[in-house]
Image (spheres, coloured by chain):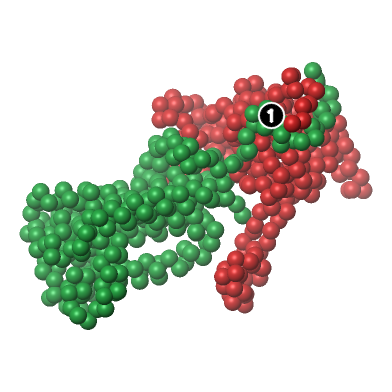
Chain colours: A green, B red
Amino acid sequence: MATSTAPPRPLPPDLTAYALAHGLTVSGARPGLRQYVHQLWSRRHFVAAFATARLTAQYSGARLGQLWQVLTPLLNAAVYYFVFGELMHTKDDVSDFVPFLVTGVFVWSFTQSTLMAGARAISGNLGLVRALHFPRAALPVSYALQQLQQLLISLGVLAAVLVCCGQLPRPSWLLVVPALALQTLFNTGVALVLARLAARTPDLAQLLPFLLRTWMYTSGVMWSVAQLVRGDSVPGVVRVLLECNPAAVYIALVRYALIDSYGTAQLPAHVWALAAAWALVAGAGGFVHFWRAEERYGRG
Amino acid sequence: MVEHPQTAEESPTVVVDGLHVTYRVHGAGSGRGNAVRALRGLLSRAPSPAVRTVHAVKGVSFVAHKGEAIGLIGSNGSGKSTLLKAVAGLLPADRGRVLTRGQPSLLGVNAALLNDLTGERNVVLGTLAMGMSRQEVAERYDSIVEFSGINEKGDFVSLPMNTYSSGMSARLKFSIAAAKTHEVLLIDEALSTGDSRFQERSRRRIAELREQAGTVFLVSHHHKTVTETCDRALWLESGTLRMDGPADEVVAAYEQSVAAKGR
């Protein structure tokens, strides 16, 4: 038995084999997918606490504080109403334009802010990633959860706006729940992809606002996709692309649930199947994509 | 399979096998007139000139055993902290391997937390991220805050961490990380932060952790701390292992070499 002052024992010739024979494992190796899901589940309290802490810290520097949670979406809707409703007269083409617009803006903001947050989830928390051990997916998932909490506040505002515009609550409002659940899954998946890409290429954070703005203008946030594709002026391929656009799908579903005059005629074909397919493909694909680089986050 | 004669008695906790670590630094270039080059670099995925790679650890091998306390010494930039991060699995190996028993934990003064959140939130988030349950966090919360001494001069724990002095935030970070027992514990300079009372407290806590843990690694520029706390020392020089042996001998050899260079 070596004492504490004895010279270190000679190294075994094959160190890795020696270590494996003693049951050691490679440090920082990527766990299997099943184990990774399990690890992430065991950090669910961290994910929730981190989301809540960030949500409440978000406006801690502003005088009006948490009131901005409600004011920000309202002001957004007001700006779009002024530009698209009053200046460009989109409101003449759409019935119930205010509920139509506010619903579109809030549902779109949910996707937009989740993706923006996702791109910062790893690159903005390198200190945490380099200091502590936890499944890295906890960060983008937590950011997505924070945006979901923000959305719930916005939905309160939305309900008030709808009632003010004469849209009274009815059973179909409950359809919002599955629609937004699917949208949340979709958003989280894409946020995971963006988190991995932005961790490797920080420039993505600069490019993303432009991509998102382009996406927003093609998603029918402040105009009606259904009316555009009804005419013959739109080639078939463009029509399919416009109708399959996941953002447009989720916006259409929430409008259908909440607004009386927004009927099935304005929904694209197979809309629920589309919504579920996008959510599953993005959710599962994004998670696996993120997991495949697990051991590389925080490097460089 | 290579059988070592002493296998029955040995219980290695960390095996480092020919480890090389490089990391990338962004923004090392001049930053002017290279937008086109940068774009080309993005497209071709080739290393851009603005990204420099630093080869910080070059072929280090050693075995650490249960019950050992190992000091890492060497001049600034010799790769001590990088080696520690690689053992913790926070920096991936370029070549070679690090194998460990369980998940090593790195306690560092650089362990960044969330500066715009309160100390309170940081304690909760940090301990949850380390994998504690909500109940464990609730049980240990008071002892963590008390250990850090943050509240000795008023209710600082409810203020955001960016209002803390650097000593205060270092103390809180150490207290959070030290709240958990670890099989392999890596400590980066933590002993030199804080006032003498906090240093004494943390030295005692490290002794405790070392009894519960298998192995403790300590990076420090204070050679007295290394000889007092450790029985073995590794001397790193520009990424390679210069010497591995009993702490007092290695520290003496290192000090001799520094003195020789200074002359």
Instruction: State the residue at coordinates (69%, 58%).
Output: B53
In this rendering, the count of numbered labels is 1
- Of A27 and B118, nearer the camera is A27
Task: Provide residue B39's location: percent of width, then percent of height.
Answer: 57, 73
Task: Provide residue A142's location: percent of width, then percent of height.
Answer: 40, 46
Residue A117 in the figure: left or right of residue B73: left
Q: Is residue B165 at least partly visible in the picture?
A: no
Instruction: State the residue at coordinates (47%, 63%).
Output: A205
Q: Residue furthest bottom?
A: A233
Task: Provide residue A100's location: percent of width, then percent of height.
Answer: 17, 64
Instruction: State the residue at coordinates (80%, 20%).
Output: A2
Q: Chain of mark 1?
A: A
Instruction: State the residue at coordinates (84%, 41%).
Output: B242
Q: Amino acid at mark 1?
A: Ala
- Of B78 and A110, nearer the camera is A110
- What residue sits right under mark 1 in the picture? A21
Look at the picture and state if A131 lies above or below B252: below
